[in-house]
Image (tube, rainbow, N blue to C red):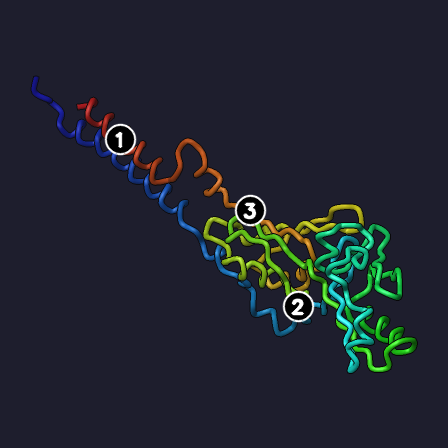
Amino acid sequence: MINKNPLKHFFKRSFFLKYFLLFFALVFISSCSTRKEIVYFQDFERLPNMPAPEDFVAKIEINDVLRIDVSSMDEELAAPFQLNLNNQSSGGGGGNQSAAMTGYLVNSEGYINFPVLGEIYVEGKSREELEEELTLILREQYLKDAVVRVRIVNFKVTIMGETGSSVIDVVDERISVPQAIAMSGDITYDGKRDNILVIRQVDDQLAYETLDLTSVDIFQNPFYWLKQNDIVYVEPTYRKVKSAGFITSWQGLVSIITTAFSLVVLFSR
């Protein structure tokens, strides 16, 4: 049978085509990342009027492992104050052999068991404060030229989520959120830069804070500097979460819709 109204059939097909192209354009645009989602420190013009982040000094906490080296011109006189790696009793008060073999474990009451001097309270002190305290005691009573060096051996932070997830050993006990993320390989395009979660233990409770790497306000956040055993989590974007579903990508969705449209056009002829 001859179609008596070809214009009507043409406009009917054009109607389907127009809305299909519109839908395709919307899907394509929504799949693209914007500058607001990707670029760090977008309001950098505010930096000249902003004070620098507060200086950070790590404090010794319960379950920390300390390496304490005592040196002197006379090595024999300094030897009794060195950690005996073959004797567990020279380690910290926690009775943990692996920790004792590494350094002095801070026990649940905040003490370490130091050779000759016995129990010393260290919780809440900085490395410099403990160095000064031990140096003063040793020089007054045992070694006139004693030199003491303290280090927190187990200063680590954990990076998880849309980054190169890793556990970072912080040698100098000072690391910021941007530094930690950069060391882990940076955030992927599927990670939220404006909602970085930092989880921290404070005394016997957990605390958290969210940081926005797209704004310079991060430099004023008290969680800008990380503490030992902090966890940093980079949340995936909505697009990434949806990609884990049945339709794994927007390309797959477009393919399904294209096939469905082709079938509708085919059977409507």
Q: Disc 1 designates what residue?
A: 259
Question: SS of the residue at dot 2?
Answer: loop
Quadrant of the rendered structure where residue 66 is?
bottom right
Quadrant of the rendered structure where residue 137 is?
bottom right
The x and y percentages for residue 21 are 29, 39
Report the number of numbered marks: 3
The x and y percentages for residue 58 are 74, 64
Q: In this view, does 165 lie above or below 151?
A: above
CA distance for labels 2 and 3: 28 Å
Residue at image position (66%, 70%) is 50
Crowding at mark 1 (Cα within 10 Å: few <14, some 14-19, many 20+)? few
Front residue of 265 and 37:
37
Quadrant of the rendered structure where residue 85 is?
bottom right
Q: Earlier in the sequence, mark 2 or mark 3?
A: 2
236 horizontally vs 65: left or right: left
Q: Disc 3 designates what residue?
A: 235
The amino acid marked with disc number 1 is Thr
60 horizontally vs 212: left or right: right
Nearer the camera: disc 1 or disc 2: 2
Q: Disc 2 designates what residue?
A: 172
Q: Quadrant of the N terminus?
A: top left
Question: SS of the residue at dot 3?
Answer: strand
Q: Earlier in the sequence, mark 3 or mark 1?
A: 3
Disc 3 to disc 1: CB gap under 8 Å: no
